[in-house]
Image (tube, rainbow, N blue to C red):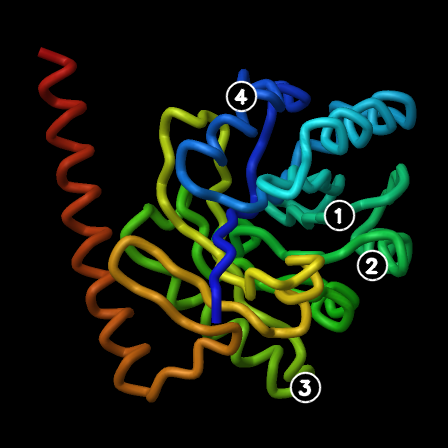
Amino acid sequence: MARAVGVVHVHSAYSHDCRDALPRLREFALERGLRFVGLTDHAEDFDEGRFAAYRAECASLSDATVTLIPGLEFRFEGYTGLHLLALGLTRWIAPATPADFIRETRGVTGLTIAAHPVLFKYTAPAEVLAGIDAIEVWNAKYNTRYLPDPRAIRLLHEVRRARPDVVATVGLDQHDAANDRRTRVIVDDGAADPLTQIRDGRFQNEGLRLSFGPAVDWPPYGLRLLEATRYVFDHVERAHERLAKKRAAR
């Protein structure tokens, strides 16, 4: 199978905390051989008119070589850390609650993702788990570029027991194209719509030294090994951070 490599969970200058204009993200894709970029700009930075301009600019910068897929990241008052992504969004929506998001994205978005479960402490409202397309088990910003999140994988497995169509995704959560953390999503190069491929489970996730499919169907010892490695890695990383703070305070 010929491969089409892409990335998801990417921010542009339409978000308040990113400086990369959409033309720069097209350049980023060309430099790294990416066929698609799944954008997820902060919904609170938009209104209906700005979203229409955003979609139009994505379309104007897309061709057979690179596709910029418009999407938004929604957060909700009273739901700390719960961020839901709508990729391939075709019209403006303004959901006030997670239940609104699930309802309003039906039929107008290509893929919905529960982002970085570590921030919502791996506990999401039942309506989200009943309606979301994917769970981001590896967020390269919060989980680092080296390892996925074993607790997010366990959440995925729990959800898939009732809904085996829910898939695992990796996300860059990129706010600066100069810092590519190198998580990738691989689909069939002949696919007309990469989001359909992802939603249907016909893709592969890849990182620097690790790859897995949409179900992360590892044997039990594989997940236990990841948990042990993650534990050691996180403790070493925190020790380095404490040391760096001591040096900065001198």
* Image quadrant occupied by the C terminus: top left
| Residue identified by numbered label 2 | 102
- The image shows residue 62, relative to residue 169, as above or below, that is above
Please state which amino acid type lies under the numbered disc 1: Gly
Q: CA distance from mark 3 to mark 4?
A: 41 Å
Please state which amino acid type lies under the numbered disc 4: Arg
Q: CA distance from mark 3 to mark 2?
A: 17 Å
Mark 3, Cα crowd under 10 Å, few <14 / some 14-19 / many 20+, is: few
| Residue identified by numbered label 4 | 24
- Of badges 2 and 1, the one in the foreground is 1
**154 on left or right of 109:** left
Callouts 3 and 4 close, C-beta under 8 Å: no
**16 on left or right of 229:** right
- Of badges 3 and 4, the one in the foreground is 4
**Which residue corresponds to the image point at 90% horizontal and 59% vertical from the top-left?**
107
**223 on left or right of 19:** left
